[in-house]
């Protein structure tokens, strides 16, 4: 077995181990499965939000964009970070104090029942599409970095099986504890790959000297128009406050203080990731200058494959961990929307807790 495959298998085994451990020790009922019994600590809120934010788009996608525009591509995560801080300062504590569990439930409190139903259906459709994209991203990562083992299709099936399995077994508690592992692995992987890849091209100064338009590519702000950066920030602020995934983590916190502080900590954790991944994209521009922009999505995978097997395996697991953490959060959000806002509200309001958990798992 290759080192890369061994590391990925060990990571999968650890995630399923956490899920089964949580399942045995967690409280019973849908509140435990969907909202971790509203007991998430500041750290667990922070790693959940970070795991949701740092997905394939925030790692492989940022490196892809950095191949063309340089380090300023990291502002995708910078915008996410600012959105998390605004959520913490403005809304997270208030949503937790209201004891709601979804945005559509919030709509019904302020508008009407039709608003809740429409909101739930709309969000479920959106999150279903995003979940499908996470499966595709997982397939792309596995097939690019382990081509002798996975095709795109089998990588996608493997990703879906792991994402669904982890969420199905342990619910939000499992997602929260797994994200401690995943976020740690993401940071170890991207820092290792960024530093090692820069060293492989002769160091930072040598890398910058080989860049086309170095004054733009090596600048954290020059590659993108200011209007684009501001636009990204505005979009991320609005989605952080209104999307079900981020809202669910605030609602599952121990109290309003844990919700608020969790988001502030998440903002600090999210911010560096994009710029570190952008460094890998810039290294790819130096290592593969003839690679066309149409293949820029391969920027990070190509750099990773140039590293030693241990570094490549850790970074592969980190890229996939980013996909795992995002997909599990979205799956939990979708299950919560259907169970709380459609099934329990309109189909079977008097459903027993045991059956509600079954419905939640079936939704996942």
Image: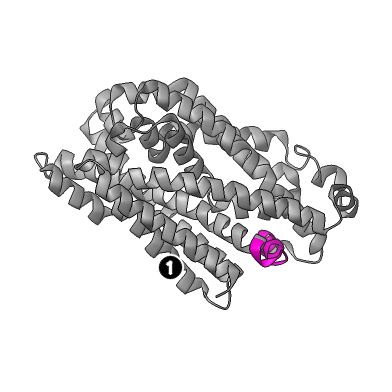
Side of 39 relative to 279 (left or right): left
> Is residue 359 rendered magenta in the image?
no
Side of 41 relative to 203 (left or right): left
Instruction: Pick the residue in front: 331 or 5.
Output: 5
Residue pictured at 40% horizontal, 40% vertical: 245
Instruction: Pick the residue in front: 354 or 131.
Output: 354
Side of 231 relative to 196 (left or right): left
Instruction: State whether the magenta stretch is mostly helix, strand or loop.
Output: helix
Side of 322 relative to 128 (left or right): right
Residue pictured at 26% horizontal, 45% vertical: 25
Q: Position of residue 47 (x, y in %)?
A: 48, 39
Residue pictured at 23% horizontal, 56% vertical: 362
Q: Where is the N terminus found, in terms of image quarters?
A: bottom right
Q: Which residue is mark 1?
A: 158
Instruction: Pick the residue in front: 177 or 331.
Output: 177
Q: Where is the C terminus found, in terms of image quarters?
A: bottom left
Q: Position of residue 333 (x, y in %)?
A: 35, 44
> Is residue 298 rendered magenta in the image?
yes
Q: Residue furthest bottom?
A: 148
Disc 1 secondary structure class: helix
Residue 299 is drawn in which quadrant? bottom right
Q: Which residues are magenta?
A: 297-310
Q: Position of residue 359 (x, y in %)?
A: 19, 51
Residue pictured at 55% horizontal, 53% vertical: 56
Q: Is residue 305 visible?
A: yes
Residue 2 is drawn in which quadrant? bottom right
Q: Position of residue 119 (x, y in %)?
A: 31, 39
């Amino acid at each position: 077995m290759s080192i890369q495959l061994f590391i990925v298998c060990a990571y999968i085994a650890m995630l399923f181990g956490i899920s089964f451990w949580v399942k045995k020790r967690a409280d019973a009922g849908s509140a435990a499965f969907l909202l971790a019994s509203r007991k998430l600590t500041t750290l667990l809120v922070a790693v959940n939000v970070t795991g949701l934010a740092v997905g394939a788009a925030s790692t492989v996608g940022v490196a892809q964009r950095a191949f063309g525009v340089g380090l300023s591509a990291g502002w995708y995560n910078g915008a996410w970070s600012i959105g998390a801080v605004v959520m913490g300062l403005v809304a997270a504590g208030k949503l937790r104090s209201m004891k709601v569990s979804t945005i559509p439930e919030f709509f019904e409190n302020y508008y009407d029942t039709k608003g809740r139903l429409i909101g739930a259906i709309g969000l479920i459709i959106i999150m279903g599409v995003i979940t499908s994209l996470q499966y595709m991203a997982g397939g792309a990562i596995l097939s690019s970095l382990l081509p002798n083992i996975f095709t795109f299709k089998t990588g996608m099936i493997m990703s879906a099986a792991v994402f669904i399995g982890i969420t199905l077994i342990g619910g939000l508690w499992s997602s929260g504890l797994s994200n401690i592992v995943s976020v740690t692995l993401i940071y170890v992987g991207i820092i290792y790959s960024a530093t090692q890849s820069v060293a492989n091209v002769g160091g930072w100064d040598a890398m910058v000297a080989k860049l086309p338009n170095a004054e733009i590519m090596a600048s954290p702000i020059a590659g993108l128009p200011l209007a684009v950066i501001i636009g990204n920030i505005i979009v991320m602020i609005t989605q952080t406050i209104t999307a079900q995934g981020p809202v669910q983590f605030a609602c599952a916190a121990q109290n309003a203080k844990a919700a608020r502080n969790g988001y502030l900590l998440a903002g600090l954790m999210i911010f560096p990731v994009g710029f570190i991944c952008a460094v890998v994209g810039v290294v790819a521009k130096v290592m593969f200058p003839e690679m066309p922009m149409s293949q820029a999505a391969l920027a990070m995978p190509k750099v990773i494959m140039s590293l030693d097997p241990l570094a490549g395996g850790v970074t592969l697991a980190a890229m996939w961990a980013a996909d795992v953490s995002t997909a599990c959060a979205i799956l939990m959000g979708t299950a919560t929307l259907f169970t709380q806002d459609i099934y329990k509200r309109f189909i079977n309001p008097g459903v027993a807790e045991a059956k509600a958990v079954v419905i939640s798992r079936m939704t996942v």
